[in-house]
Image: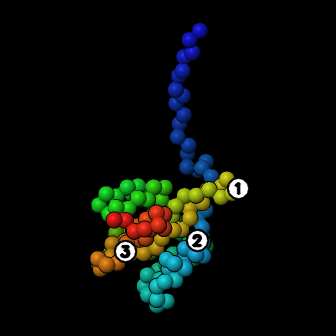
Amino acid sequence: MVALIVPLRVPPPERRNLPPVSIRFDREEWEEEVERLDERSEARIQALRARREIEGGKAALDLQKCEADDEASGTRLVGCVKSYVPLGKQGASEAPFGFVFQLAQNPDGSLVWNFIAFGERHPDNPATRTVYERAHKRLHGRYPE
């Protein structure tokens, strides 16, 4: 007897049927990424505002997939997404900062976006690390080469 294997055509799930994925800002990462900045700096003020909006449920987050392997910058951010800050803005001039989150699983099996980095998306100063380089360091223990 020969078995016939027929691939099933399963329609993609509708977004409304997907389980919610929460966002988590752990204290250690927040301190290292945001509290390192001067309290009066525009970057820190924008990060605090964005976090309040996210945690308050007031933000319609536009999470965008990070480049998994960016040859130009050397960053490897597999499983990560980014959000521009200030929230709801686009382009480097309107949203000069960004958050990077990594998808993880809680002990109960639920999914969570873990905050891993904050910083300038495209800094003017070449000595300033981008948010993507900071995220790479958190994930791989070193800045990209």
Residue tagged 3: 129
Closer to us: 110 or 85: 110
Q: Amino acid at mark 1?
A: Asp
Q: Is residue 14 visible?
A: yes
Residue 138, how many percent across, how many down?
48, 68
Mark 2, other Cα within 10 Å: few <14 / some 14–19 / many ≥20? some
Residue tagged 2: 25
108 vs 117: above or below: above
Query: What residue is rendered at 49% in x and 55% in y?
Result: 79
Mark 3, other Cα within 10 Å: few <14 / some 14–19 / many ≥20? some
109 vs 60: above or below: above
Specify which label sits upstream in the sequence, 1 or 3. Answer: 1
Are dots 2 and 1 in contact, CB under 8 Å? no
Are dots 3 and 2 in contact, CB under 8 Å? no
Are dots 1 and 3 in contact, CB under 8 Å? no
Residue 144, how many percent across, how many down?
37, 65
Specify which label sits upstream in the sequence, 2 or 1. Answer: 2
Q: Is residue 95 left or right of residue 1?
A: left
Closer to us: 100 or 135: 135
- Label 2, label 1: how many angstroms apart (C-alpha)? 18 Å
Q: Amino acid at mark 3?
A: Arg
